[in-house]
Amino acid sequence: MRAKSAAPIRHTRYSVTFSSHQSEPVVSLATLKDVDEIVRLIEANSADHGGHISPEFGRATIEGLLERSAIILTVRIGARLAGVLFSTDKEFQFTPSVSAMLRAWPGRSSAYVYGPVCIDERDRGKGLLAKLFDELKKRLPGREAVLFIERKNETSLRAHLRLGMRVVAEFSHRGKDFLVLHFVEEL
């Protein structure tokens, strides 16, 4: 089977349904103008603040990903950033933890790295993760998503299993245990 090439990035917004008493969430591609808000959201959910996002994921990494045309999706409720989802081609192993994951499960030749993903604490459980992932699948149809979740992060693991992802491997990195998940949507 031949590997499929990456789908071109489409610079469009798309709206999704949300409860009637709040602004409708809007999923769109991130730009350099979004970096400050993304950094604040990531920092609020970093390991230093009780979250699970790697400290490897700072401003320089985010700006570098945007400059390399990674697909970074944001979801906003009104003007407020409610979540962000990162994805890159697996050849661009931008952190040591991603490299460790890909040694455990390299995925298909056309696979991409999914994550990290971060949803604002006050917006969790409202379907925003599914909306971000649905948009990502539209932009990268038929390609395998490969991601890792810290083993003890049961909330994230449950959320990703509900999206249809499955555990395919595990690895340890810097004294922590991780599960590797993947998702393939056959066309």
Image (cartoon, rainbow, N blue to C red):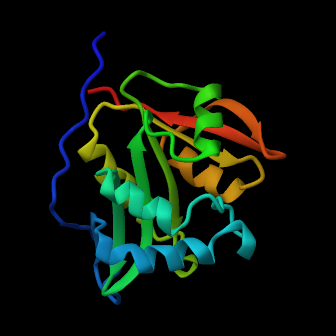
Q: Residue furthest right?
A: 175
Q: Position of residue 154 (x, y in %)?
A: 71, 54
In the image, is residue 134 above or below residue 58?
above
Horizontal side of 92 relative to 21 (left or right) equals right
Q: Position of residue 61 (x, y in %)?
A: 49, 59
Evaluate whether residue 10 shows in this view: yes
Q: Position of residue 138 (x, y in %)?
A: 25, 46
Q: Quadrant of residue 161?
A: top right
Residue that appears at 45% across and 73% down: 38
Residue that appears at 26% across and 24% down: 4
Evaluate whether residue 130 shows in this view: no
Q: Nearer the viewer, residue 54 or 150?
A: 54
Q: Position of residue 43 (x, y in %)?
A: 60, 75
Q: Residue furthest top?
A: 1
Viewport quadrant of the N terminus: top left
In the image, is residue 152 above or below residue 36?
above
Q: Quadrant of residue 48?
A: bottom right
Viewport quadrant of the C terminus: top left
* Numbered marks: total: 0
Residue that appears at 63% across and 61% down: 53
Horizontal side of 120 relative to 84 (left or right) equals right
In the image, is residue 104 above or below residue 65?
above
Horizontal side of 136 relative to 101 (left or right) equals left
Residue that appears at 59% across and 26% down: 105
In the image, is residue 71 above or below residue 185?
below
